[in-house]
Image (spheres, grey):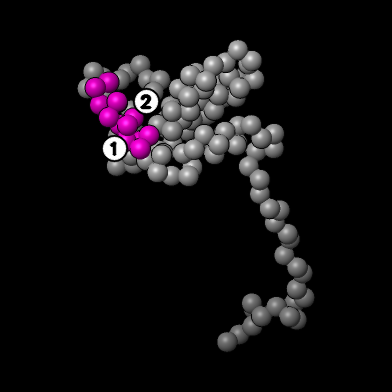
Amino acid sequence: MKFFERVKLERRLKQLLKKDSSTEKEKQTILNDLRYVKFFPPSKRYISLFGKKNTAADEKLMPSLREEALLAASESPEGTDQFLLQFITSKSGPTSTPVSAPEEISPEEDDFFLAN
């Protein structure tokens, strides 16, 4: 559930950044929703942002859970606007170092199959 909501919010944020007429308030709303999804307290039952089956009790509980998630995000370097936007604005996605292939070892040098 959280994965799909995160993807939906990232897609919406990407579309919003492409539009010239987007406001800072709209951007902050989506970023806060993204923080809610990413930093939701793991010890509690997740309440969907877009769910139509949320009960009245869930709706009452959601603001306090949102505050908890936003507090956790503010304490983490991964909760900053810059960090949340870096994967959305980059063309190639997250940067990673290429992994080199292991060097070839001749069967004589390989001690894996030697008896103890």
What number is the disc on residue 48?
2
Q: Quarter holding the N terminus? A: top left
Is-magenta flag for residue 60? yes
Residue 44, numbered circle: 1
Q: Quick check: marks 1 and 2 in contact, CB under 8 Å?
A: no
Range drawn in magenta: 59-71
The quadrant of the image that shows the C terminus is bottom right
Quadrant of residue 13 within the rendered picture = top right
In this view, which residue lies farthest toward the bottom?
116
Residue visible at 40% across and 43% down? 75
Q: Is residue 20 visible?
A: yes
Q: Residue furthest front?
A: 24
The front one of 94 and 72 is: 72
Q: Secondary structure at mark 2?
A: loop
Determine whether, in the image, residue 66 is placed left or right of residue 102. left
- Residue at (35, 37) in percent of width and height: 71
Q: Position of residue 43 (x, y in %)?
A: 29, 42
Location of residue 83 with respect to 104 vertically, above or below:
above
Q: Nearer the viewer, residue 78 or 51?
A: 78
